[in-house]
Amino acid sequence: MAFKLAEKGLNLVLVGRNISKLDQVSREILSENPNTQMKKLVVDFSRNVVAGVREMELAIKGLEIGVLINNVGVTYPEAMYFHEVEEKVWMNLVNVNLRGTTLVTRAVIKGMIKRRKGAIVSIGSAASVVVPSHPLYAIYAATKPYIDQMSRSLYVEYKRYGIDIQCQVPLYVSTKMTENVAGIKRASMFIPSAEDYAEAAVKCIGYEIRCSPYWAHAVQWFFASLLPDFVLDSWRYSVGIRRRSSLRKSA
């Protein structure tokens, strides 16, 4: 989404845990948008989320952050039953997906309140609203309704300050995470590339409180809503089992 925001003329603060990837992204953005001003912050929320957010707060002090995109997130290393998930894995999910998003939002929203304007977009997941369950990824799936409910509640709290808060709930997008979760290796009509999703996502900022920006995702959401829960439960369970078997055979 950083590329699309730069195309709209916004200056950027890029936050990531890998400096080489941040450098690569910044070079690519500047090659197409040479007037974009950028600041890069190396923060690893999986190590010490509180210290990471404090470091970020110091780095952005004095900057007018007009749009915040909460897109940080991790999942399981493979499809796993609940009793198999080690504590360090699910604690990492809690620290990154929940604490990271919450603390970053809290750090940025204070300035938006003073300026009485801003937008906060949190990238949730279809696991929170489109399907009734996400077996073999239970703890990951449980973090996503938190993002959705927090966004919807904050929208009501802060709309009087001119702050637009939105939760986007994509289905599968062709990324490294979805390759791990579902074995998706390339984009298709119903599974957009990260670039195609980002284009749709940026266009949706400022509209609905909760949305699924990519058109094919919205179509799938509609048809999923027509199916009984037990059908979707069985489908999601079969996807998890197949992915689990595939990963273990290749190991």
Image: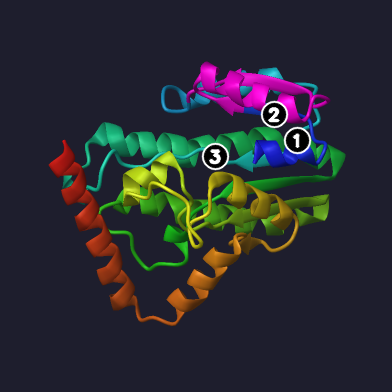
Left of 111 or right of it: where is 155? Answer: left
Residue span colored magenta: 15-44
Residue 110 located left or right of residue 201:
right
Mark 2 lies on a secondary structure that is helix
Mark 1 lies on a secondary structure that is helix
At numbered mark 3, what does the secondary structure look like: helix, strand or loop? helix
| Dot 2 and dot 3 residues touching (CB under 8 Å) | no
Separation of marks 2 and 1 at Cα, in angstroms: 7 Å
Circle 3 residues within 10 Å: few <14, some 14–19, many ≥20: many
**Number of residues whose C-alpha sits closer than 10 Å to that of mark 2, classed few (under 14), some (14–19) or many (20 or more):** many
Q: Amino acid at mark 2?
A: Ile
Instruction: Name which residue lies at 51% across and 61% down.
Output: 189
- The image's mark for residue 216 is none
Q: Earlier in the sequence, mark 1 or mark 3?
A: 1
Residue picked out by circle 1: 6
Could you tell me residue 11's position as x and y percent?
Answer: 78, 30
Residue plotted at (55% across, 66% down) = 216
Query: Where residue 101 is drawn, which disc sits there?
Result: 3
The answer to which of 242 and 92 lies nearer the viewer is 242
Residue 220 point in image, percent of width and height: 48, 70
Quarter holding the N terminus is top right
Q: CA distance from mark 1 to mark 3?
A: 22 Å
Residue under the image location 81 percent in, 50 percent down: 161
Q: Nearer the viewer, mark 2 or mark 3?
A: 2
Residue 63: percent from left, percent from top? 79, 25
Give the residue pinned by disc 2: 29
